[in-house]
Amino acid sequence: MKTHTEDRKMNDLISRVGEDVSQLKSDIRSLFTHTGRHALPDSARELREHARQRLMAGGTYLRQHPGQSSIGLLGGLLILGAVGAGVYYLCKSDCCGGGKGFIDGEG
């Protein structure tokens, strides 16, 4: 059977745990507030500035090498068209639908 002393110790322990949890909540709230006010805006500004510099560098490169950018674009479009045609013919072929492909309405 518990004595009066044990009950008082238990109540003191529960009280201290409650105070510690309250202090922890306060510390976490303070951390989030500080992070929201200082760290995140600074990081966002740095990211914005970095992106602006990269875009300006890309624009400068394209102005200096206009032929290379159009060749790259044309090559990319050709590859994309070849992949699209391959997918179309694969879906139309017998391997996917067991006789009729997806494009023919069954599959």
Image (cartoon, rainbow, N blue to C red):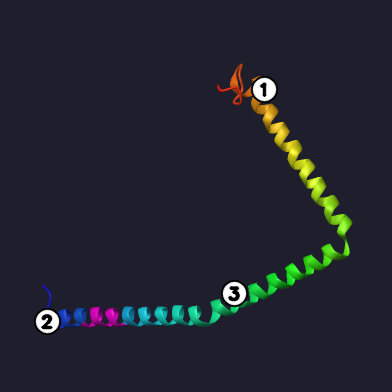
Q: Place residue 80 in its image quadrant.
A: top right
Residue 52 pos. (x, y %): 70, 72
Where residue 90 appears, as percent x and y from the top left, is 68, 27
Look at mark 2 in the image and give the residue it sits on. Answer: 4
Q: Is residue 80 above or below residue 31?
A: above
Secondary element type, mark 1:
loop
Q: Which mark is residue 39?
A: none
Q: Earlier in the sequence, mark 3 or mark 1?
A: 3
Percent from the top left, x then y, of residue 70?
Answer: 84, 53
Disc 3, SS: helix
Q: How many numbered marks appear?
A: 3
Q: Which residue is mark 3?
A: 44
The local secondary structure at tag 2 comes to: helix
User: Looking at the figure, which quarter contains the C terminus?
Assistant: top right
Q: Name the residue beneath numbered marker 1.
A: 93
What span is colored magenta in the figure? 12-19
Q: Residue at x 12, y 75 (%)?
A: 2
Task: Tell me the amino acid under the disc marked 3.
Answer: Ala
- Location of the N terminus by quadrant is bottom left
The question of residue 36 being in magenta is answered with no
Amino acid at pointer 1: Ser
